[in-house]
Amino acid sequence: MVEGLKIKMYSFTIDCKDPHGLAKFYAELLNWKIVFADEEYACVSAPGTKQGAYPCILFQMNPEYEPPVWPEKPEAQQQMAHLDFAVNDLEKAVDHAIKCGATVSDEQFSDSWRVMFDPAGHPFCLCQMKSIIESDHFALL
């Protein structure tokens, strides 16, 4: 690292057509707060944190956004990244995500996690990780 240089993760940015709508989904899913929103951007952060205190999820307006196809198929829009969320009760977390507006992927590859899609079609995973959730070292609850 270059002496004196500081680099900290600020956000994970997700393209979408409706930043505020997608921020509302993730705020409800994670019990986080929308810390700012305008026509082009919306940001959610853990409750009780100031903007920038923890990395946030930032939603960016992209009128040309096309949801990825998962699992991947040739000649289709590919996913660039996805979010994984640790949960202490997988089935309750899946039910909660569905009530928030998520859908369950038709294809699953493990009993330890569920692939879901947010309302804009981004894949994300709910991962059974009770020991991590209950750890004193897990910061973002």
Image: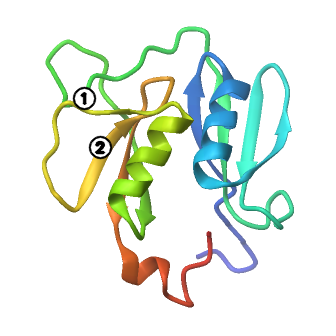
Q: Which one is closest to the eye, mark 2 or mark 1?
A: 2
The x, y position of residue 69, in whole percent, is 27, 22
* Of residues 140 and 54, the one drawn nearer to the viewer in this rendering: 140
For the residue labelled by badge 1, is the local secondary structure a helix, a strand or a loop? loop
Q: Compared to 75, does 54 lie above or below?
A: below
Taking the spot 67% from the left edge, 41% from the top edge, the residue there is: 58
Residue at 73 percent across and 55 percent down: it is 45
Quadrant location, the N terminus: bottom right
Give the alpha-carbon distance from disc 2 to disc 1, as whole Å: 9 Å
Residue 123 horizontal/vertical position (percent): 37, 36
Classify mark 1: residues with Cα within 10 Å, few (<14), some (14-19) or many (20+): some
What residue is shown with label 2? 115
Residue 139's spot in the image, x, y percent? 61, 77
Dot 2: what SS?
A: strand
Q: Is residue 74 above or below residue 64?
A: below
Residue at image x 76%, y 78%? 4
Q: Earlier in the sequence, mark 2 or mark 1?
A: 1
Amino acid, disc 2: Val
- Under mark 1, the amino acid is Trp
Labels 2 and 1 touching (C-beta < 8 A): yes
Q: Where is residue 46 shown, x and y percent of the image? A: 72, 61
Q: Residue at x 38, y 65 (%)?
A: 89
Is 38 on the left or on the right of 14, as rendered? right
The residue that disc 1 covers is 70
